[in-house]
Image (cartoon, helix red, strand yellow):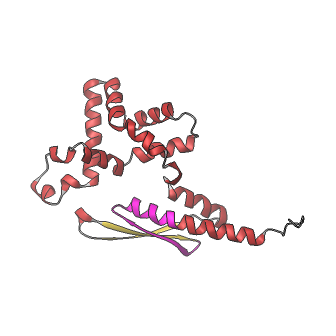
Amino acid sequence: MLGWVVADLAYRQHAALDEGKLTDLRKAIVNADALARVARQVGVGEALLLGKGEDAAGGRHKRSILADAFEAIIGAVYLDGGADEGYAFVGRVLGGRIADTVTALGGLDHKTALQELAVRRFDSPPVYVLREEGPDHEKHFFATARVDGQVWGRGEGRSKKQAEQAAAQEAYGRLSLEVAERDRATQPADQTGA
């Protein structure tokens, strides 16, 4: 339900975007981080019924629990009111985020951009090495992005995905610069004298 509504709204509001950008737009809104942010804003955590252990471990603030609970609310609206009510609810709660996200489309998926560049240039995909620190309810992740055996980027975040995206962003920037410099160095001199 959620993915369908966001994809439909994105297409209706931004039909001029190509298929890849529309997919990136949907992924930026339909993911655990974005859904947890919305759940926090509307107070889902305070309404959760949790066991004593989970509550004591900070469950009301956990990204995965908040995102799952918010998706369950969407499912409940759909089951109770039908497709039209489910669509309207998702549109009211998430519709405004679509316009806000369009401005950031250039930087949504650094991992995909890095993979395309690495495969095109080195014929091998990037490799991510992850490490984590902290207790289960407050994990922090660190990622290293390697391309062709060399470290090109490092990143960190509260999820594996955030850490890998940050590492991919740095790696893509550095690798793009390196590729551009190599390409300039191998281009023949301008024969016109200009």
In the rendering, at what x and y percent does residue 176 appear? 61, 65
In the rendering, at what x and y percent does residue 52 appear? 9, 55
Queried whether the magenta region covers residue 80, the answer comes back as: no
Position above or below: 159 against 51 = below
Queried whether the magenta region covers residue 149, the answer comes back as: yes
Instruction: Write down the region rendered in magenta.
Output: 148-170
Q: Quadrant of residue 26?
A: top left
* Residue occupying the far front of the picture: 194
Horizontal placement of 45 versus 23: left or right?
left
Q: Quadrant of residue 172?
A: bottom right
The residue drawn where x is 56% and y is 57% is 113
* Residue occupying the far bottom of the picture: 150
Q: Quadrant of the N terminus?
A: top left
Position above or below: 81 against 171 = above
Horizontal placement of 63 versus 9: left or right?
left
In the rendering, at what x and y percent does residue 89 appear? 31, 31
In the rendering, at what x and y percent does residue 98 appear? 43, 40
The residue drawn where x is 66% and y is 68% is 179
Q: Nearer the viewer, residue 83 or 88?
A: 88
* Residue occupying the far left of the picture: 52
The residue drawn where x is 52% and y is 35% is 14
The residue drawn where x is 14% and y is 55% is 55
Q: Quadrant of residue 92?
A: top left
Q: Nearer the viewer, residue 61 or 1?
A: 61
Q: Quadrant of the C terminus?
A: bottom right
Label tally: 0
